[in-house]
Image: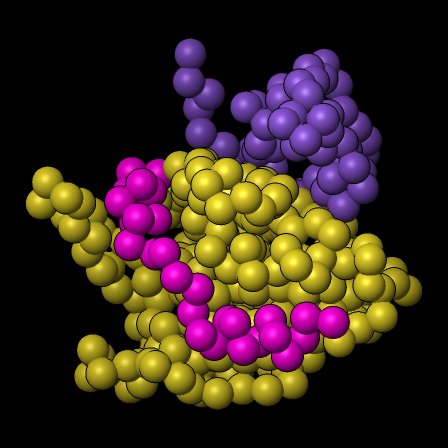
């Protein structure tokens, strides 16, 4: 995921902005920087959303699958 | 207002998660049978490709993107195209298609009834063959309001849902059903569908925050072209 996408993503519950924590970056084929791993945290409610393998999981927490070991 | 037959909201989320699990299970085979964009979607994208002012910073959204065959149509006229789906398995098929065909899509796992996108950010959206997988009327109506929220007032979206007008169905009222998907080994997997009566689809749209611009029945599907709501910015 490109960091600029954070400008349009929001918390699915209260629609407030998300802050990126614990980010790991990787440089893609076209030299652009991608976030590969991290956590997106709602600035308002504090809910934490995983970003794994380059894809943010912004499902409401009750719909999120149990994270595989 | 929720329908009386709707279960409590907690069940609602669990049932949406079930639908997600179903598509995780069938993702690879399902996507392999979905190679081509729908002509109705191509026409919509052609008609609205550059019809509003924010050229250069346009954001496109494929809601219920599956393998991103429709996201692919948006990349030429949008700076950013978001492909959103509840199923991680389907998002993987989208990533694969984007890689093979050389287009760029920002993938995001999310729920169509609780969109993780900021208000008035989307200029063009495609929401086809997805709404009918939301298992309650409450979730479907919430989803329409969510689309209205994220869509710019000058933005346009194409919606479709399967309807009782299709030859396959004898019913005239909208109803819930499951339709089997058969995996290559012969294993059947049930998928939830709500089959809309055309007037029910129309009524749900009218009750939503969306502004309905055009409406038609085509190939047994209800289609609507809609605009976002004006009121959001004042909130």
* Residue B50 pos. (x, y %): 74, 71
- Identify the residue at horizontal 44%, vertical 50% (top origin): B66
- Which quadrant of the structure image shows residue B75? bottom right
On screen, residue B167 versus residue B194, left or right, reads left
Q: Does residue B41 lie above or below A8 as drawn?
A: below
Q: Does residue B64 lie above or below B224 as drawn?
A: above
Q: Residue furthest toward the left?
A: B186
- Identify the residue at horizontal 82%, vertical 55% (top origin): B57
| Residue in front for this viewpoint, B185 or B56 | B56
Q: Main secondary structure of the magenta part?
A: helix
Q: Is residue B208 visible?
A: no
Span colored in magenta: B24-50
* Residue B212 pos. (x, y %): 64, 82
* Residue B116 part of the magenta segment: no
* Residue B232 pos. (x, y %): 82, 64
- Identify the residue at horizontal 68%, vertical 31% (top origin): A30
The number of numbered discs placed on residues in the rendered structure image is 0
- Identify the residue at horizontal 56%, vertical 61% (top origin): B73
* Residue B30 part of the magenta segment: yes
Q: Does residue B167 lie above or below A37 as drawn?
A: below
Which chain is purple in the rendering?
A
| Residue in front for this viewpoint, B118 or B62 | B62
Q: What shade does chain B have?
A: yellow
- Which quadrant of the structure image shows residue A6? top right
* Residue B146 pos. (x, y %): 65, 59
- Which quadrant of the structure image shows residue A53? top right
């Amino acid at each position: 995921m490109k960091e600029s996408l954070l400008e349009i993503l929001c918390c699915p519950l209260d629609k407030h902005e998300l802050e990126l924590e614990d980010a790991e970056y990787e440089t893609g084929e076209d030299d652009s920087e991608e976030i590969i791993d991290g956590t997106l945290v709602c600035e308002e409610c504090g809910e934490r959303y995983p970003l794994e393998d380059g894809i943010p999981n912004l499902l409401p927490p009750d719909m999120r699958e149990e994270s595989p070991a | 207002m929720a329908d009386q037959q709707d279960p409590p909201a907690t069940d609602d989320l669990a049932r949406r998660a079930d639908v997600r699990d179903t598509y995780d299970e069938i993702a690879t085979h399902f996507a392999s049978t979905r190679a081509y964009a729908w002509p109705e979607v191509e026409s919509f994208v052609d008609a609205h490709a550059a019809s509003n002012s924010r050229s250069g910073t346009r954001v496109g959204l494929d809601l219920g993107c599956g393998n991103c065959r429709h996201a692919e149509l948006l990349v030429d006229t949008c700076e950013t195209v978001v492909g959103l789906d509840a199923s991680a398995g389907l998002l993987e098929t989208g990533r694969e298609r984007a890689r093979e065909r050389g287009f760029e899509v920002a993938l995001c796992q999310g729920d169509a009834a609780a969109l993780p996108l900021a208000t008035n950010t989307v200029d063009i959206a495609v929401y086809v063959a997805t709404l009918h997988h939301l298992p309650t009327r409450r979730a479907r109506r919430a989803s329409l309001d969510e689309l209205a929220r994220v869509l710019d007032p000058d933005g346009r979206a194409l919606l479709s849902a399967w309807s009782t007008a299709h030859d396959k169905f004898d019913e005239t009222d909208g109803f819930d059903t499951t339709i089997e998907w058969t995996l290559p080994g012969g294993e059947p997997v049930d998928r939830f569908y709500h089959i809309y009566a055309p007037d029910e689809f129309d009524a749900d749209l009218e009750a939503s925050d969306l502004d309905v611009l055009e409406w038609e029945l085509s190939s047994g599907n209800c289609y609507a072209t809609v605009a976002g709501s004006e009121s959001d910015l004042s909130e």
